[in-house]
Amino acid sequence: MIDTHCHLHFSEYDQDRETVFQRSWNSGIKTLILVGCDAEDSGQAMKLAQNFDGAFFSAGFHPHEAARWDLDKKQKLEELSLHPKCVAIGEVGLDYYRNLSPKEDQQKVFIEMLNLAKSRQLPLIIHCRQAGDEMVSLLKEQGPFPSSGVMHCFSGDSKYLKDCLKLGFYISFAGNLTFPNAQELRDRAAEVPMERLLAETDCPYLTPVPFRGKRNEPGFLSHTVRKLAEIRNLPFEEMSDGISQNARRLFKLGHHAGN
């Protein structure tokens, strides 16, 4: 299995990171992508990815951090995006739910990151929360994106899902898919074409049932994949193999060093 979105470089793992990696490999995770949230954080993800053969990273600037954007951070991310283990630009996007940065700043930084993804021919890892209309509008204005991308931790409605698919993006689901009150999300997962489906942990967040309430980790990915298999009425192995193939195709994992 491939965890397409995790944050094992976060401080939550400082005390037992090696053990968490080992549990991940033992659980069947063969590859994971450490996702950056700002310039410094992306640098930490890069350093960690260098230490593990199955680990890659992305360089991005989260919308929560957009008010802190400056030229130095832009140049740092441009440098990181050239690293042989950098497989994507992200996470980037819009978050109008928490609005921790002004909307104008979020949109400005997002466009900068879209341009970087196009220039480097890397896929995007997109964060979108309560900003679906603006997201689709910006992607249409700034596109097309030949290297595609993924709507990480999808949480939109059916219309937004269809718009994202029309734009050529993959759709990823996290541990909240397993929550008892997440039937609408499971309905959306049933609508995604198999060849566009991905899974992630977004750890340390969104821990799936039956570990909800605990710190999440890549080794728990199988519970989300199992729920996807249940939703699609497929054997677990078929679902796991299918979404792993999708991840390798999107992130060109066979073309990068260390894989």
Image: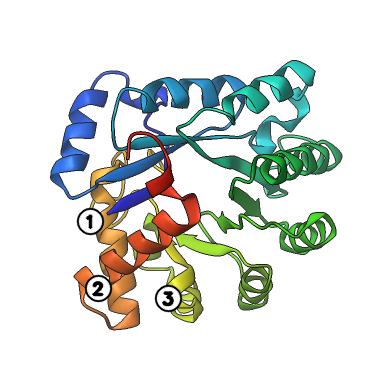
As drawn, which residue projects farthest toward the left?
A: 26
Q: Nearer the viewer, residue 251 or 165?
A: 251
Point 61% across, 72% down: residue = 165
Q: Quadrant of the N terminus?
A: bottom left
To which residue does mark 1 refer? 210
Comes first in the chain, label 3 or label 2: 3
The x, y position of residue 163, in whole percent, is 69, 72
Using a 10 Å C-alpha cutoff, classify the residue at mark 2 as few (fewer than 14 neighbours), some (14 to 19) or many (20 or more).
Answer: few
Provide the secondary structure element on which disc 3 rests. helix
Q: Nearer the viewer, mark 2 or mark 1?
A: 2
| Above-or-below relation of 256 to 200 | above
To which residue does mark 2 refer? 238
Give, as a three-letter code, the residue at label 3: Met
Using a 10 Å C-alpha cutoff, classify the residue at mark 1 as few (fewer than 14 neighbours), some (14 to 19) or many (20 or more).
Answer: few
Point 27% across, 64% down: residue = 240
Give, as a three-letter code, the residue at label 1: Pro
Point 32% across, 51% down: residue = 2
Q: Quadrant of residue 242?
A: bottom left
> How far apart are the alpha carbons under marks 3 and 1?
25 Å
